Amino acid sequence: MSLSQPSNRRTVLKSSLAASAAACLGPIASNTLAATQRQTPSPNEQIQFGIVGIGPRCTYDVKAMLPFNDVRCVAIADVQASRRDAGKQLVDGFYNNQDCKLYSDFRELLDRKDIDAVLIATGDRWHATASILAAQAGKDVYSEKPCGITIEACQKLADTINQTQRVFQAGTQRRSVPNFVQAVEWVHQGKLGKLQTMHASVYIPVLENNWLAPQPQPDKSIVDWNLWLGPAAWRPYNQAYCDGKWRGQWDFDSGARLLDWGAHTVDLCQWANQADDTMPLEYEPLADKIVCTYANGVKLIIDFLAQPFGDRSPHYITRLGTCPVRFIGSDGSVETGDSGEIVATPESLQKEVTEASKKVAGLDVTAHARNFFDCMRTRQKPVANQDVMRRSHIACHAAAIAWILNRKLTIDPKTESFVGDAQANLLRTRPDRVWQSLA
């Protein structure tokens, strides 16, 4: 029996509620849990999860999840045989068995009643569609970001999660990393005075749709090209797409690459401004930034900080590491990034930096994953749930559309549509290719 079966879920909730509830109160509580120090559960209490799409990022996620004693990876689905096999070697090697089942079509994995949750780490084009299908199949979902390739995709995903009452966690793990938590806490506690301006770093946006040279399409047992494309527009096969050259391509990527970092940094600014239930109203693109304005007057500056394809100029990574953010108030400021370092004024704030906030890099997903699995047991919302994801992702997409059109846009946060701009509203969605019945 697994958590997907209601009779067993009641037993699980009764036995685990007290131990798990703290993790769902927020990232501070989640980080205090000894993430891998769970008692060995009975088979009826163990969470079983499958993987949909296993590449470099997924491998990083899975390595953080495998040590959880109450969680077990039992299946991997990927359209590429080489990645399926590498994933099986990783999982079976950790468990010292040969139990991990492989699938080329993730729909077969979703049909399994013994799987409680899925980790979705495909390319951007698949995140929302795969998450929706998983939720409809009764699975809880941890989805890598960006979780939706358009505004409409983010809306449909959040609506589906709410309708099916599944547990959803976006892979915006910096909400669970101590140095970012520390910075946001200071804003909420008023230690910077009245919040005035926030800075979210992103890659310099790109807009590209040049096809790579066609190559002979391999047998679908090696690479299932139709399933690789999924809902994205058709184009001829080239292995380089499968190896990562899809990034920056309009058909495959999210918001002109703005969401690559923005899904993290804009999300942190949303949190700092206590704006998880809304988003900026105005988006004004400038040469090196997009200036966004909230209803409460706070400015969000989306800074074009980094070249996206390996340019190691001094502006590629700041001394604070990737994904730095800065919060400026009337009485002080704080800046932090993936290095874990916190730079704050006035001087007295710097003395309050906790030792815990210096020890975890921003890429670490352990506490974020633990928060997800614990909330599966309590059925509470994780820290980066579907509603949090919806608003922060839509804010990123709105900024990207303003940059693409090169004009100031205003969005209605209730309808999540642009005011008086039909062209901008057309870019909120894109047609899905019919892939389900194609061989």
Image (cartoon, rainbow, N blue to C red):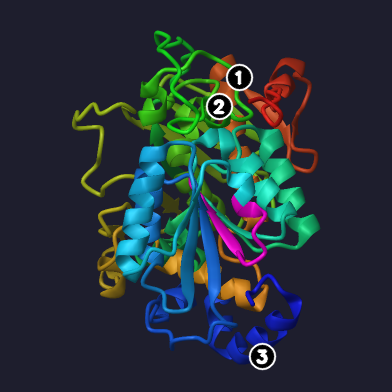
Q: Residue at x 64, y 32 (%)?
A: 150
- Residue 14 tag number: 3
Q: Which residues are magenta?
A: 109-121
Q: Marks 2 and 3: which is nearer the front?
A: 2
Q: Residue at x 31, y 59 (%)?
A: 345
Of pointers 2 and 3, the one earlier in the residue sequence? 3
Q: Give the left or right position of residue 315, taking residue 419 as reference.
A: left
Q: Quadrant of the C terminus?
A: top right
Determine whether 7 is above or below 180 in the image.
Answer: below
- Residue 233 tag number: 1
Of pointers 3 and 1, the one earlier in the residue sequence? 3
* Residue 205 point in image, percent of width and height: 44, 24
Residues at badges 2 and 1 in contact (C-beta under 8 Å)?
Answer: yes
- Residue 229 tag number: 2
Residues at badges 3 and 1 in contact (C-beta under 8 Å)?
Answer: no
Give the alpha-carbon distance from disc 2 to disc 1, as whole Å. 7 Å
Give the alpha-carbon distance from disc 3 to disc 1, as whole Å. 47 Å
Residues at badges 2 and 3 in contact (C-beta under 8 Å)?
Answer: no
- Determine if residue 342 is in view: yes
Give the alpha-carbon distance from disc 2 to disc 3, as whole Å. 43 Å
Q: Quadrant of the N terminus?
A: bottom right
Decide which of 388, 168 is in the foreground and name it.
168
* Residue 328 point in image, percent of width and height: 42, 51
* Residue 282 point in image, percent of width and height: 64, 32
